[in-house]
Structure formats: C-alpha cells, structure tokens
C-alpha cells in the first residue's frame, strides 16, 4: 500500500516520455490519468503521439543503460529496487540530483525517473523530492512504493 499521505490524496499521473510500442518504433507521447484512493480510474486521456523522439537503436541503448542502474550491483538504484527485482519486476531507471542553489534544507533536489514492467503490466514514474538530496535515497523509495501498489505487490 501507499504511505498514508499519498493514499489520502489519491494518485495523479501525467506522463510525457518515450514509448516503445514495438521494437522498431520509438515515439514521444503524453497521457493523463487520475486515480482514486483505491487506484480505480477517475479520468484518463488517450495517449497522444507527439513525435518520434530517437532512433530505435538509441532507444535500445538508453533502455539497456537504465536497466543497469537497477540490475548491476554497482548501479545507483540497485539497492532501492532490489525487492522489486526479486519479485521479477524489471525496473529501468535514472537517478539524479538537481542542483538548485539555496533552499530551506540546504540539500539538492532528489530525482528518480523510471518505468517498470511485470508481465503485460507497465508503469512509468517520475519523482522529485525538493531538498531530498540524492535520488536513490529519497525519491526511489517513493517510486518503489507506487510500483508495488500499482502492480499489486506487497
């Protein structure tokens, strides 16, 4: 389940990113989905293709590198996603730290962007924790909780 504060507001997801509908197709798409507390769909828009973003070869390389972030023991999100990997959920991720200058915490913003798949279920998530520090430490655990809730994992 989601942490209490996330559960109480439901879920709002707006995705603009790479979509790989087929092995030889890479498109930039946008979708919008609003979910209730029980994760039932309240509103959803159809996926809209904006453009072809990169060549299939480049997309395969990026996808491979994102998988290494979680599967390689030296990957920055290996520890944060180990539980999902053990359950057979593939997670493709990019961790990050956004240097933002001075804020109330004195820390940079933590960033974690990923997509995950288990069987025919897929989800894409972007998390930014203002003043959170490093993405793998602050933002990745939130994304992992969302993935588990969405895919029905414990």
Image: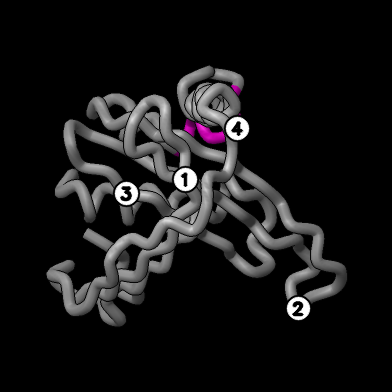
> In the rendering, which numbered label is found on residue 137?
none
Judge depth for marks 1 and 4 and give the one in front.
1
**Between discs 3 and 2, the one toward the N terminus:** 2
Judge depth for marks 3 and 2 and give the one in front.
3
Tell me the SS state at disc 2: loop
Q: Is residue 107 above or below residue 23?
A: below
Give the distance between the C-alpha atoms of the residues marked 2 and 4, in whole angstroms: 26 Å
The foreground one among 70 and 21 is 21
Q: Could you tell whether 22 is left or right of 73 in the image? A: left
- Badge 1 is on which residue? 27
> In the rendering, which numbered label is found on residue 76?
4
**Between discs 2 and 1, the one toward the N terminus:** 1
Give the distance between the C-alpha atoms of the residues marked 1 and 4, in whole angstroms: 27 Å
**Between discs 3 and 1, the one toward the N terminus:** 1
- Badge 3 is on which residue? 123
Quadrant in the picture for the N terminus: bottom left
> In the rendering, which numbered label is found on residue 104?
2
Judge depth for marks 2 and 1 and give the one in front.
1
- Which segment did they paint magenta? 75-80
Q: Could you tell whether 101 is left or right of 85 in the image? A: right
């Amino acid at each position: 389940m989601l942490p209490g504060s996330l559960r109480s507001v439901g879920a709002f997801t707006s995705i603009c990113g790479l979509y790989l509908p087929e092995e030889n197709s890479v498109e930039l798409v946008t979708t919008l989905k609003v979910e209730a507390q029980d994760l039932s769909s309240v509103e959803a828009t159809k996926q809209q293709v904006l453009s072809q973003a990169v060549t299939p070869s480049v997309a395969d390389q990026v996808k491979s590198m994102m998988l290494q972030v979680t599967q390689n023991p030296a990957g920055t999100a290996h520890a944060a996603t180990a539980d999902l990997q053990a359950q057979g959920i593939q997670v493709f991720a990019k961790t990050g730290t956004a240097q933002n200058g001075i804020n109330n915490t004195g820390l940079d913003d933590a960033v974690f962007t990923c997509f995950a798949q288990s069987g025919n279920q897929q989800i894409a998530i972007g998390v930014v924790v203002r003043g959170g520090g490093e993405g793998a430490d602050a933002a990745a655990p939130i994304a992992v909780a969302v993935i588990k809730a969405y895919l029905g994992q414990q």
